[in-house]
Structures are given as structure tokens and as C-alpha cells.
Image (spheres, coloured by chain):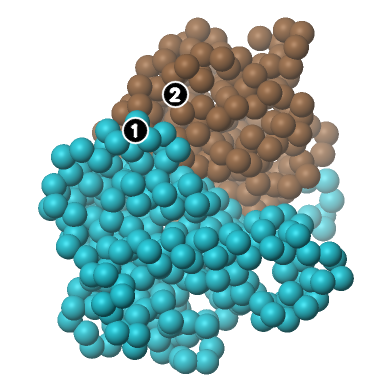
Amino acid sequence: MSTEETPSATTGTARVKRGMAEMLKGGVIMDVVTPEQAKIAEDAGAVAVMALERVPADIRAQGGVARMSDPDLIDGIIETVSIPVMAKARIGHFAEAQVLQSLGVDYIDESEVLTPADYENHIDKWAFTVPFVCGATNLGEALRRITEGAAMIRSKGEAGTGDVSNATGHMRKIRKEIRRLQTLAEDELYVAAKELQAPYELVKEVAQAGKLPVVLFTAGGIATPADAAMMMQLGAEGVFVGSGIFKSGDPAKRAEAIVKATTFYDDPDVVAKVSRGLGEPMVGINVDEIPEPHRLETRGW
Amino acid sequence: MTAAPTIGVFALQGDVREHLHALQRLGVDAIAVRRPEELERCHGVVLPGGESTTMIKLARTFELLEPLRTRVAEGMPAFGTCAGMILVADRIRDGAPGQETVGGLDITVRRNAFGRQVDSFEAELEFDGLDRDVHAVFIRAPWVEEVGPEVEVLARVPASAPEEDAAGRIVAVRRGPLMATSFHPEVAHDDDRIHGLFVDLVTKS
């Protein structure tokens, strides 16, 4: 050590939280509801698993209030796999997040898939050592979540549908709004910040870098290798697959195929090869057929 | 070697872009490697941070594993960070069942040795061959438990580490053209010195 004032090692810094998401890039994060499914996901090449009690398709079908998973379930999954384990807390439910941190999960998803616990405030994510990922439908929403301390963003899509159209829309919108910022004069960024309802400093940073200051994944409706390849070509840095794997006919094979298609997203020959013989995809619901009040993308603001 | 060397970054998964940028800042022809023909063009290869189980599985599936093993055995320089350190190690502890490595470096690495993500940390540490301390970012990092007789230890965890049993652990090593760090020099901004050491290894080989 060069001086005695050298700061001691620190945990929970922004760099360590955002860095964790950097390590997941180019990978697939899979929803799992049992340790057995978690093992299938790990064997298929998932970079992480999301531990939850019900996949979004079942939450949608069964209704009721959707909450954080049982700690025993999360423990069981943590004990079974060696890859990172994520878990979901309700929007604004900081006590659920405290519990998840105490369980040792590697990332918390403050998720619209669960029933929100606070219709005004999201969790103050700076207060935690564990990093958070949050959903967004547009750039302003992404930047508000980053302001609150999110270390990773995912486009929301419409979870539990197997319909990729909303994920496409959200990813295109975020990217388009970033490109627009890059075309603005510096003195126009103040108004842009007002319109985006996001802090000026962050807006300026995005305008200069041409990207978010954190990793951007996609989620909500991805069900096939081609879905994953399209989202990666649209600028996603990785993919969350929820119901798409374990609601399909041959989960192990489909999981592996989506992992391969995410790595070779720009090589149609590989995507074609891995798309063969996957069995039945999840049945799915068209987003258009879901009445507005039952859409998850509108949760969070 | 006279012209700038071509250094590949293993690009099946992980923080590939950060390594490419670090190498480009050093004037290297840096390319992403996902296919055997891309590996053939390289004078050296970087194995990035990411999920080691995912990378090794994809390397086998897409027929990169054997060509990479062959090139490393023939003396091609390789540099692994975090997951990449696991890949170049001859032996792993706490790997997934049956987890393979590329191998080549005579070390035993413990995967996720520092703990889970809440235990991830950053710290200043001394690095052999560099005059100033390095700012090291450890993310679900491995450490080196045993080194073979010819392996040089380049860095250890400082006494300020959050976990007591982490202090003094080996986190950077080199043997001949093979180098590995438990931490991520590619995410420490404005400091490409460790990548510079690797580029020197490639240029000299």
C-alpha cells in the first residue's frame, strides 16, 4: 500500500453492482420455480436464474396478489446451482428487498410482474448492497430507475404472454429516444431532461455516450430462439426468458437453443439450426386480447 | 513481431466490449472471437469476465474448445479475468458438476471464492511489475488456492479485504505466456496497465 490513508475494500459500490450486470451480457436469465428447473437452466447454459413461485403466465392465469417468493424456495435454488440467483420484490416493497438481500440473492428484480406495493414510490435502491434490475418501457422510465439506484435495466415487454411485440416496442423506443438525444444541441438537453422527467446530468451522460450508463437487457414475451435473436439485433445486451421455457414442450432443449441464438444472434444459419425440433412453444396470449387493466407493462412509472 | 498484433476476445458471453475497448486504446487490432476461423487469426486471446459454465459449454458446442486448447498448448499467449481465470486454470474447486476448463495454467482456482454478489468489492492492491497500485474490482470472484512451481504470483488481496480469510489470497498469476486475474482490470476506467502487460507478452512471443 502506498499510503496509510488507502481506503479499505468496499462492497456494494455502483461499480460492483453495475459490473455484475456487465458480466451477464450476451447471456440468458431464466425464470425457474423449483430447484430441478434451476438445474436444467444451469445445464442449458443460463448465466443466471430468476427464482420465483409462479412464472408470469401462471400469475396471469391464477390472479390474486403476487408477492416475493418463499425464502425456503429461494434457499433451495441457491443451494442447487452455482450460477447467480436473482429474485423478485414487489415495486416499492423495500422490506421484501431487505429479506431477499438477507437471503443472499445476487440481484433483485423490482418487478411489475408482482403486484405493486406502493403506487407512488419505487424502492430506494442506493440503500442496498445487493444490486437491482428494473423494467422500463421508455428512456425516461429507465433513467428514473437508474436515478433511484438500479444497476441494470430490462425492457418490460408484456410478461407471461409469449407475445414479443411489446418487448420489441419498448426496446425500439428506448433506443430511438437515445438516438434522438444524440442529435440535440447541448442547450436543448435541459428541455429534453424536463420532457423525459429525468435528471439533466444523467440525460447529458446518455446523450454523450449514446447508451445507458448501465446494461440493458430485454424481457417480457420472448419464447423462441428467433425472438431472442431479434431482441439482440435491436440492441438488447442479453435476454430474460420467463414463461417461455418451462411452459414449452421441451424446456431443456428450448433453453439451450435460446442460449445459442443469443450468442449467435446475428448469424441466421445458427438461429435456423437451433430452431429445429424444439417441440411445442408456450401457447401464449396476444397482448391485444388482454384488457388494459390487466397489462403488466403499465405498472411502474 | 513488427505490425500491431491481433488479439482476440473470446466473445461467447461476458464483458467482451470492455476488453475490446481496453485493447483498442493500446493500439491493438482487437477482434471478437466466436468461431474457429476467428481464433486462427489471433496472436493472443483474452478470456473475459462472465459466467464460466456458460462460456465453456458454448465453447464446446461451437467447436472452439479443442482449437483453443491446441493453440494454448502451442504457446499462444492467453489472459483470463475472473471467469476467464477459471477457464485457463488446470483445476477448479466448487465448479458445476463436471465443469471442464481450457486449462494450460498450473493453478487450482476456487470458483465464487469470495462469496455471493453482496460480498463483491473493490480495493487497491499492489501488482508485481507495476509501480503504482491497481484499483481492482472483484465480482463474485474466484481466487487461486494452489500454484504450480513455475507460476509467478503477481498480486494478493490486501489486508483491508471485507472477509478475514480473503486477505493474502492470490488473485493474479503468470506463467510464461499465460496470465490471469481474479478481478476485472477491464472495468477499472482509465487504467489499461494490466492489459498493457499482456500486450507486451503477445508482442514478445
| Label 1: chain letter | A
Q: Residue at position x 29%, y 36% from top? A: A272
Q: Which mark is residue A234?
A: none
Q: Nearer the viewer, mark 2 or mark 1?
A: 1
Q: Number of marks in the image? A: 2
Residue at disc 1, secondary structure? helix
Left or right? Give the position of A11 relative to B188: left
Query: Pointer 2: residues within 10 angstroms few (<14), some, or many (20+)?
Result: some
Left or right? Give the position of B2 relative to A256: right
Chain in cyan in the render: A
Q: Residue at position x 48%, y 82% from top? A: A300
Residue that carries the numbered disc 2 in the rendered image: B35
Residue at disc 2, secondary structure? loop
- Residue B81, percent from left and from top: 56, 36
| Label 2: chain letter | B
Residue that carries the numbered disc 1 in the rendered image: A270
- Amino acid type of disc 1? Val
Q: Colour of chain B?
A: brown
Q: Residue at position x 51%, y 27% from top? A: B33
In-front residue for pair B164/A118: A118
Q: Residue at position x 66%, y 30% from top? A: B154
Residue A96 falls in image quadrant: bottom left
Q: Share a chain, discs 2 and 1?
A: no
The answer to whether residue B77 of the structure is visible from this angle is no
- Amino acid type of disc 2? Arg
- Residue A199, percent from left and from top: 72, 77
Mark-to-mark CA distance, 2 and 1:
12 Å
- Residue B187, percent from left and from top: 65, 46
Circles 2, 1 touching at the beta carbon (< 8 Å) = no
The answer to whether residue A245 of the structure is visible from this angle is yes
